[in-house]
Amino acid sequence: SDLLVAATRAATRDDPVDAHAIYELMAILPFALGIPLSFLALGSGVVLGLTSRWRVLRHWWVTTKLALLGATILLGALAVGPTVDTLVDGTASADAVDRSGAWRLVVVLATQLVMVLTAVILAMFRPGGRTPWAGRSTR
């Protein structure tokens, strides 16, 4: 969410120097917070899934959470990182800000936020339904 706020702020700046400073910060933050926390969430989720009654692939809500986290990480690696790098380079010479790239970044970050919030809602409400891989269980 911090990156989304920063990206929105940079996208609305008319001064490329301001936008450049924000994009430089955005290039650093994922390595300091986003990536480590994403992999911590993934690792702890798999460990909890393997050691709890919910398992990793037994219930759709757990499987969907895992897929959402994986998609969030991939989106960050394949879209957010390269786009931020491009915007850092594009604003370095104090030329005009690439508005389409700037707003594309905002949309991708908003999509990531929606995926994470969906995972949180799934964890809170645990909608029913077992996957075909659930096997037979008395629970």
Image (spheres, grey):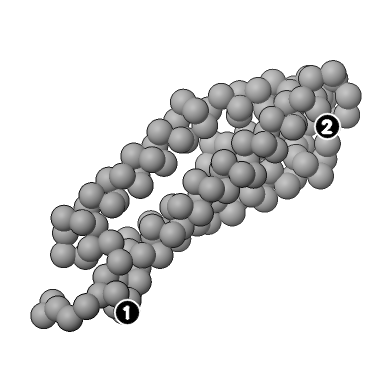
> Does residue 4 appear in the picture of this structure?
no
Assign a secondary structure to mark 1. loop
Residue 130: image x %, image y %?
A: 29, 77
Residue 132: image x %, image y %?
A: 32, 79
Instruction: Count neighbours of disc 2 (C-alpha within 10 A) and say few if under 14, some if 14 to 19, many if 20 or more.
Output: many
The answer to whether residue 122 is left or right of residue 89 is: left
Which mark is on residue 132? 1
The answer to whether residue 139 is left or right of residue 43 is: left
Residue nearest the observer in this picture, 135 or 120: 135
Residue nearest the observer in this picture, 3 or 129: 129
Counting every numbered tag in the picture gives 2
Residue 136: image x %, image y %?
A: 17, 81
Report how far apart the C-alphas of labels 1 and 2 lie in the structure: 49 Å
For discs 1 and 2, the disc positioned in front in the rendered view: 1
Task: Give amino acid for label 2.
Answer: Val
Task: Give amino acid for label 1.
Answer: Pro
Earlier in the chain: of badge 1 and badge 2, it is 2
Image quadrant occupied by the C terminus: bottom left
Q: Residue at x 74, y 45 (%)?
A: 103
Which residue is label 2 attached to? 97
Residue nearest the observer in this picture, 80 or 131: 131
Snapshot quadrant of residue 124: bottom left
Residue 99: image x %, image y %?
A: 82, 40
> Does residue 36 appear in the picture of this structure?
yes
